[in-house]
Amino acid sequence: MSFIDLFSGHADRYAEARPRYPEALFAFIASHAPSRARAWDCGTGNGQAAASLANHFAEVLATDPSVEQIAHAVAVNNVHYSVQPAEATTLPARSVDAICVAQALHWFDFERFFAEARRVAVPGAICAAWGYTWFNVAGDFDTAFRAFVTDVIAPYWAPQNKFLWDGYVDVPMPFSRVAAPAFTIEANWNLYQLLAYVRTWSAARRCLAENGTEFFESATARLAALWGAPEASRVVTMPLHLLLGRVS
């Protein structure tokens, strides 16, 4: 399967608008790794997860097939970026203690990726893949958002997103499953920040490109009436779906 690139064209906006993962997630992953020498962040995108992994591992190898995403990745001393697909890398065999995939597993060729993960993992390495889907603000706002945005852009989603929407339950991870607590992203955003994030969605960008901005402008006006002052911050939560296994 060839690389499906839906994000390179707006890598700078993607880096600015995407929410941050909870630090407790990375601490949990590190606590289950056989050592904290090296982690691999595959499909690193803007390097957000790699930067957090760098707080828990001596070295982080971060790969992504997108030149543009790597060009906009956050610079961290112990994070080493390279442009490589997750399914075939130049990483040495038995070299990483943790294999992490943030918001990207559903784009991978599962069979080839898990074979590569097994190749580069040290015995007992932890493999963690996670992602988020819909956010929650408040009942009235969430209902309106579904009607004015989610339902409108629904035909523009790539079919791979269904793996994520279903919580990765249908992903054939061949490793021994590890139990994990629930993790949630929590952001304090104003309406402008929330809508900037929504505009990074691949389906939203496809819909805007095909139909123009009128639907989004109309939705923004309706949502603003429910938000209050658009510059006021509100708590936005996104539950994480976490798939965790131990490589044996």
Image (cartoon, rainbow, N blue to C red):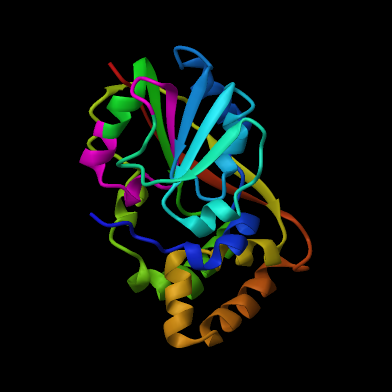
Up-down relation of residue 221 to residue 200 (above or below): below
Instruction: Decide if residue 132 is on the left or right side of residue 16.
Output: left
Instruction: Decide if residue 111 is on the left or right side of residue 210.
Output: left
Q: How many marks?
A: 0
Residue sitting at x 46%, y 17%: 33
Give the percent coordinates (x, y) of residue 129.
40, 36
Q: Does residue 128 show up?
A: yes
Up-down relation of residue 17 to residue 99 (above or below): below
Give the percent coordinates (x, y) of residue 14.
57, 59
Splitting the image into 4 quarters, where does residue 118 fall? top left
* Magenta stretch, residue numbers: 92-115
Residue sitting at x 48%, y 54%: 134
Q: Does residue 137 show up?
A: no
Up-down relation of residue 87 to residue 234 (above or below): above
Instruction: Decide if residue 84 is on the left or right side of residue 232.
Output: left
Asked if the magenta segment contains residue 95, the reply would be: yes
Splitting the image into 4 quarters, where does residue 93 fall? top left
Give the percent coordinates (x, y) of residue 100.
44, 33
Instruction: From the viewer's side, name the closer residue of 108 and 141.
Output: 108
Which quarter of the rendered picture does the C terminus lie within? Answer: top left
Which quarter of the rendered picture does the N terminus lie within? Answer: bottom left
Residue sitting at x 43%, y 78%: 207
Instruction: From the viewer's side, name the closer residue of 135 and 162.
Output: 162
Asked if the magenta segment contains residue 100, the reply would be: yes
Residue sitting at x 62%, y 37%: 51
Splitting the image into 4 quarters, where does residue 142 fall? bottom right
Give the percent coordinates (x, y) of residue 132.
47, 47
